[in-house]
Image (tube, helix red, strand yellow):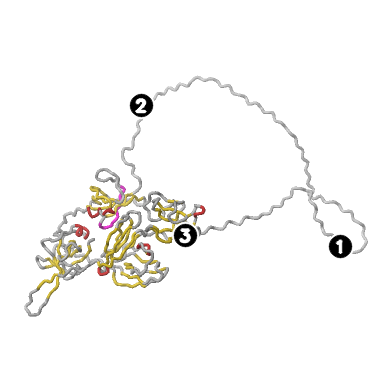
Amino acid sequence: MSCSTNICLSGTGVYDDTYTIDGLYFGLDYYTGSTNGYYIFYSTTENRWCLAANLGDPCILFGPNPTSSSCPDFYPSILSDGVCPPTPPPPVPCDIDFNAEFDCDVPPTPTPTPTSTITPTPTLTPTPTNVCGGVSLDVTANTYSPTPTPTPTNTPTPSSPIVRPCNYDGVAKFNNVDGFIVCATSKKFEDCFTGIEYYTTQTLFDSVGNLLVVGDVYGGTINGKSSCFIFQTIVDNISGGDKIVITTEYGPSSDGSCLDCIPITSTPTMTPTMTPTPTKPCSCNAYDISNFTVTTEVITFTDCSSNEEIDLRPGSMGWLTWADNVIHICSSTVPVISQGTAIVTNVGVCCNSTLCLQYELTNNSPLASQPFIYTNLLGLTITQTLNAGQSVIINSLSTPYSLYGGIYVSTTGVSCFPSPSPTPTQTPTPSSTNTTILTYDWTSGSSWWPTDTLACNNYVSFASNGWTTSTSSPSIGDSLIDNGTNLPVTGHNNQWIGISSTSAPGVVVYAVAVNSNGTIIGVTLCP
């Protein structure tokens, strides 16, 4: 999810080393060599990842220009994730002492003569020993000057041309490839509203015949169903089988173009009354983490949606340290603190709307489409992007974080659900006891929608017919009362509608879904 803490450069000579994240430089991680002291950082002047002796110096080694990578992207043959393996010691050379003697004139090693007794004996005359062991060699050398033997030259014999009685007449035809050569790759698309990914090997163009643009939003059908989808990338490890038809272009997803696309809802076929599907309970707990002792601890938790293990550092929020911040986490396991200590408090299930806070996010990096993560009111992990220099305020059950440290997160402390002013409704009573039942009136559009996103996008204030709830904000399990009949709404099972308080119409908008009995089964705070 984020850049590797350690990276290894190899095959570059003096720059070979293990480089470790040492802080933020212009909103992105930078690395320091563990032994050579060189730096790896994103250069805003050269628009690429650099290695230099100091931060901001001209590049010595560098990656591609321009680049959209938020992590170092040097050539893969010299860059790898993790710590460099230790250099093996050089092999000990074989020390073989060859002592060869090629002369027979070797001084004989004297043989010790045993000491004889002092008995007079005749003097012995020593016989010389032939050290060559009786081997002799006579060599005679003769010098010859060879006379070259002349090579006879063949005299060519003229020959008459060969006449071949074969005539060939006709037309040679060459078949051109008239069409597209389709490579073994798939195009990856993501549904704007469900996040479901689709893959296809089709040759696709937009409605006017142009090539598709990565990151743009298109409208059309996927497997026969009207959809709004983002063209993500080309992949070579998946053979897609989805059927995709493109009819409309809406522009870059980073500009919010998904909101301009509305899928066409087909007229439902009358079916018997369906038993409402129970809402899936929230499977994650919420944790507050505070009182950091080192202020640079690493928080490790398990993402509720993907079940992936995530490591959070202060740089994930664009901060230098945790300081006195309280971090809110939704996790399927108890968060673990390393490289220091902190207090971890379980504050209940994650899908508790009272835990929702507003956060301001700003992309301080020079890179566009920086991704960030937050948790919506259903406890689902949502990924969005933010362009360079852009700011946005979001509602989240957990503290948002960025994947590459390029986004600064500011906690506003404002609750996602400011309570609308209650409108007291006088109820006549036969007794003299004054009883005031507080109800809360809501205004909305007249249309119901199959998704919360469509309900939010098509909210219209001051409809002729209003709604009432018994709580200051819509709550699951509460009834949505039709003010025209003073009864729970009917005929809208598993459908959504956008509503806001009559005391402040359009200021805070909710999308609510009801079952066949008019009971609220889903609530989403509209962005």
Q: In the image, is residue 200 part of the stretch drawn in magenta?
A: yes
In this rendering, which labeled residue sits more in front, label 1 or label 3?
A: 3
Residue 517 visible (yes or no): no
At mark 1, the secondary structure is loop
At mark 2, the secondary structure is loop
Residue under the image location 22 percent in, 68 percent down: 418
Which region of the structure is painted magenta? Answer: 193-201
The type of residue carrying mark 3 is: Val
Residue 115's mark? 1
* Rendered-image quadrant of the N terminus: bottom left
Q: Which residue is mark 2?
A: 170
Q: x, y percentage for residue 38? A: 47, 56
User: Measured along the vertical axis of the image, is residue 434 above or below residue 251?
Assistant: below
Q: In the image, is residue 80 part of the stretch drawn in magenta?
A: no
User: Measured along the vertical axis of the image, is residue 91 above or below residue 164?
Assistant: below
| Residue 75 vs residue 70, the one in the foreground | 70
Q: Quadrant of residue 296?
A: bottom left
Residue 92 visible (yes or no): yes
Residue 83's mark? 3
Residue under the image location 31 percent in, 55 percent down: 387
- The CA distance from mark 1 to mark 3 is 75 Å
User: Measured along the vertical axis of the image, is residue 161 above or below residue 259?
Assistant: above
Question: Going from the N terminus, do you reach mark 1 or mark 3 first?
Answer: 3
The type of residue carrying mark 2 is: Gly
Marks 1 and 3 in Cβ contact (< 8 Å) = no
In this rendering, which labeled residue sits more in front, label 3 or label 2?
A: 3
